[in-house]
Amino acid sequence: MSHSAQTDTPLHNDLIAAIPNMRAFAISLCGNRDRADDLVQEALVKAWNHLDSFEEGTNLKAWLFTILRNAYFSELRKTKREIADSEGYHAAKLSAPPEQQGHLDLLDLNNALTKLPADQREALILVGAEGFSYEDAAAVAGCAVGTVKSRVNRARTRLNELMSQTPAASDKANQSADTDRPPLTPTTPAGSSRRARAV
């Protein structure tokens, strides 16, 4: 069946429905809205051109996220530089009540997320914000399920610590941590989901 004949299929509709989540994940990876839109477009084009490699009955969103993540790290290897999620845009996607305190709490969460190591932040976003199972998150990140569980656990623990600190104490703790360890660069996936391997 040609792609043009597939434009009204449930799979096509599912691709369209996944775009907001893909955009939020792309922003959390690269920290730039314009670049995130480019990544999403690139991933959608690749997915559309390789629909035959998608196994029906498996997690479409995980497959799309894997393609998007691979595209990001492929570019990262070419540019040899890390683009940090300095603004924590992904957290801004989370819903919050209109009260002023709720807005401030969201800003605090936003700030705390940016202070997590990149691999822990990614795992927490995949499992906590996007609702992936540990197995699907591991497939997206190209690592073992146990690694994802460990990253999520450490991220939640660190996030709780950061959220319970005063702003001054949090800044001091992070300055101290920065002097004790080198900056973390997101790890290039050791492997990718076999569902996205053809892409």
Image (cartoon, grey):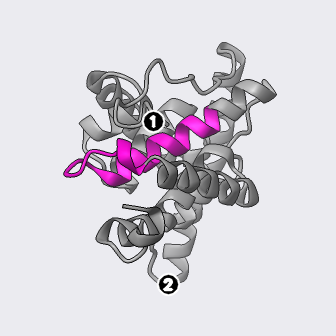
* Residue carrying label 2: 99
Q: Nearer the viewer, residue 128 or 57?
A: 57
Spot occupied by residue 160 in the image (x, y as percentages of width and height): 41, 44
Q: Which residue is mark 1?
A: 158
Q: Between disc 2 and disc 1, whose residue precedes?
A: 2
Does 58 appear in magenta? yes
For this rendering, which residue is in front, 116 or 57? 57
Q: Is residue 163 visible?
A: yes
- Image height of 45 relative to 127, above or below: below
What residue range appears in magenta? Answer: 51-73
User: Mark 1: few, some, or many residues within 10 Å (few <14, many ≥20)?
Assistant: some
Main secondary-structure element of the magenta-colored stretch:
helix
Report helix, strand or loop for mark 2. Answer: loop
Residue 178, by quadrant, is top right
Q: Quadrant of residue 157?
A: top left
What is the three-letter code of the residue carrying label 1? Arg
Which quadrant would residue 100 be assigned to in this image? bottom right
Task: Report x, y in % for residue 4.
Answer: 48, 70
Quadrant of the image for the N terminus? Answer: bottom left
